[in-house]
Amino acid sequence: MSVRTGREFLSIPGPTNIPDPVLSAMHQPAIDIYKQDFPPLTDSLLKDLRELFQTEGKSFIYIANGHGAWEAALSNVLSRGDKILVLESGLFANGWGEAGASLGLDVEVLEGSWRAAVNPEAVANRLKEDEDHDIKAILMVQVDTASSIVNDVEAVGKAIRSTGHPALFMVDTIASLGTMEFAMDDWGVDVAVAAAQKGLMSPPGLSFNAAGPRAMERHENANLRTAYWDWTARMGKIHYQKYAGTPPEHLLFALRKSFDLLKEEGVEAASLRHRLLAGATQAAVEKWSEEGVLQFNVPEPEHRAPAVTTVLFEKGFKPGPLLDFCDKKCGVVVGIGIGALDGKAMRIAHMGYANAPMLLGTLSVIEMGLKALSIPHGDGGTQAAIDYLAARVDAG
Ligand SMILES: *Cc1c(COP(=O)(O)O)cnc(C)c1O
């Protein structure tokens, strides 16, 4: 017996739901890549990216997923053998560091926790020890999608600058851009990385770099530069150079539409929407946790991301049966735990194109599964989410 037929709900932290107008924007014939309309389209996307990153610096669009943009960022500002410091807060900064190791960088991980944000003081202390300035770049994520930690980019940027250390500050906003504030220039970030398929509501396949003046300066002598990723080559006068070849036309049409939707809503309104959906999710998880089986991966509310919530399973319970129930019986796809939390957690995404009924539907089905499978939990999680939103979404 199942109640699955109907619209499937995708509640995973990337790729996320693609709005119908974005899908429709791709449904058109290929166009001549030398057509005059193309350069203005590219310019508009690059400009909107700069606005989203809040930077006066340069922006770049790659035909690649986030891993590609990671490699682009590293190869444009670093040289073989350079030391980089990775700030651990889950899976992804470390993954970026591993990409650096394969490029020939000397990678040091400042060990952190999968349950708490990067401690700015620990970063400053490590930099103070580095009197010879061996560390050339510091890598951090704003939101880690495995742990669902949000790091305080502003505070870490401040801590770095307080030491006077010249290392570049490089930040992965793949799971946060479009879901919360990111102020690249004000926060002292030199290089930012993002991708299309999470908060930006577009299909996977595009990713982005933004580079400030200090990064552009290091770029001049970076010897990891290659033809395809190279920022200078992509700043060439000819449009074709912006993509190092044929533009990914349909993905660009999609991205244009996604940016239009985001602007229509307003970036601040979208951030607030994400905070509300995250708060509602947390209200539900708080209730469910009362029986000690389910538990927040991130105990400190301030360290919890607005885009995704990772929920641990304790006391010998595993998430598999519940996730299967949600998917196979109800048509709701909830994220699995990944990395160190593989088989130990579920991830509820509230990221990108997501509204109250989608989230409440997801939470209801999870609660239905908890009951159906007799997984001990506090009752009324979904009701708590409803109450949370009812108290905050004004009726005006
Ligand atoms: C998803 C994600 C990545 C990886 O992006 P891909 O497009 O899968 O290569 C990197 N960093 C963060 C924070 C992510 O959430």
Image (tube, grey):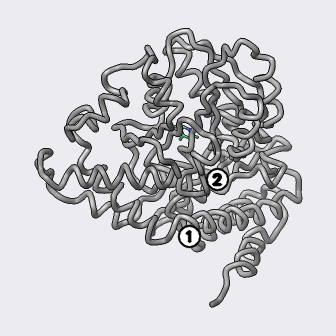
Q: Mark 1 or mark 2: which comes first in sequence?
A: 2
Pick the front one: 7 or 113: 113
Residue 328 visible to an observer of this rendering: no
Is residue 196 left or right of 180 when viewed as pictured? left
Q: Are marks 1 and 2 in contact (CB under 8 Å)?
A: no
- Residue 261 % position (x, y): 42, 67
Pick the front one: 315 or 347: 347
Question: Would you place residue 22 above or below residue 143 in this image?
Answer: below
The CB of the residue at mark 2 lies under 8 Å from ligand 1: no
Is residue 306 left or right of 18 when viewed as pictured? right
Name the residue rendered at 79%, 53% in the picture.
Answer: 302
Residue identified by numbered label 2: 308
Amino acid type of the residue tagged 1 in the rendering: Asn
Residue identified by numbered label 1: 355
Pick the front one: 57 or 78: 57
**Quadrant for the N terminus in the image:** bottom right
Question: Would you place residue 106 above or below residue 388 in this image?
Answer: above
Question: Would you place residue 180 above or below residue 112 in this image?
Answer: below
Label 1 sits on a secondary structure element that is loop
Q: Which mark is residue 46?
A: none
- Residue 141 % position (x, y): 63, 38
